[in-house]
Image (tube, grey):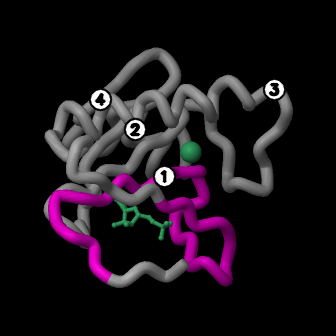
Amino acid sequence: MSECIFCKIINREIPSEIVYENNEVLAFKDINPVSPVHVIVIPKKHICCANMIENEDVELIGKIFIAIKEVANKLGIAEDGYRIINNCGENAGQTVKHIHFHLIGGTNLGEKLI
Ligand code: AMP
Ligand code: ZN
């Protein structure tokens, strides 16, 4: 049994609204959405943050971006556009220590941070 809440979601130990799944990647709706579409996309492999990505993970990280594109298509935001965000570590406010990419869209996201 994992202590990580995203591993628990992968293992169906806690419920989530899954929107996409394959052997290596899972995507589910964020419980506290900041936009009409807010999906969390994760590798099933537990990697705690961007700092811990290894060479052996290169293909997996690429597959996450393929999944993001497919989710965006499926949820109808691909054409209008969206933002992908990864928070790494304390200064970025990372709260869940299982690497994840926020896919947000469904509205004009307004001012950019960068
Ligand atoms: P971060 O601040 O980048 O670590 O983002 C973590 C995200 O996970 C936040 O947007 C939370 O709302 C989301 N989150 C936390 N627990 C759950 C959950 N059980 N199901 C779905 N999303 C969650
Ligand atoms: Zn995990």
Marks 4/3: CA–CA distance:
23 Å
Give the image quarter of residue 9: top left
Answer above or below: position of 74 versus 22: below
Query: Which one is in front in this view, the residue at disc 3 or the one at disc 2?
Result: 2
Marks 2/4: CA–CA distance:
9 Å
Q: Residues within 10 Å of mark 4 (few under 14, many from 20)?
A: some
Q: Which residues are magenta?
A: 85-110
Q: Within 8 Å: ligand 1 and the Cβ of disc 2?
A: no
Disc 4 is placed on an element classified as: strand
Residue 20: mark in rendering: 4
Q: Earlier in the sequence, mark 4 or mark 3?
A: 4
Disc 3 is placed on an element classified as: helix
Which image quadrant shows ligand 1?
A: bottom left
Residue 68: mark in rendering: 2
Q: Earlier in the sequence, mark 4 or mark 1?
A: 4
The foreground one among 48 and 109 is 109
Which residue is located at x 56 percent, y 79 percent? Answer: 93
Residue furthest toward the top?
A: 23
Residue 101: mark in rendering: 1
Q: Residues within 10 Å of mark 1 (few under 14, many from 20)?
A: many
Which residue is located at x 20 percent, y 42 percent? Answer: 17
Give, as a three-letter code, the residue at label 1: Phe
Query: Which one is in front in this view, the residue at disc 2 or the one at disc 1?
Result: 2
Which residue is located at x 61 percent, y 30 percent? Answer: 62
Give, as a three-letter code, the residue at label 4: Tyr
Residue 56: mark in rendering: 3
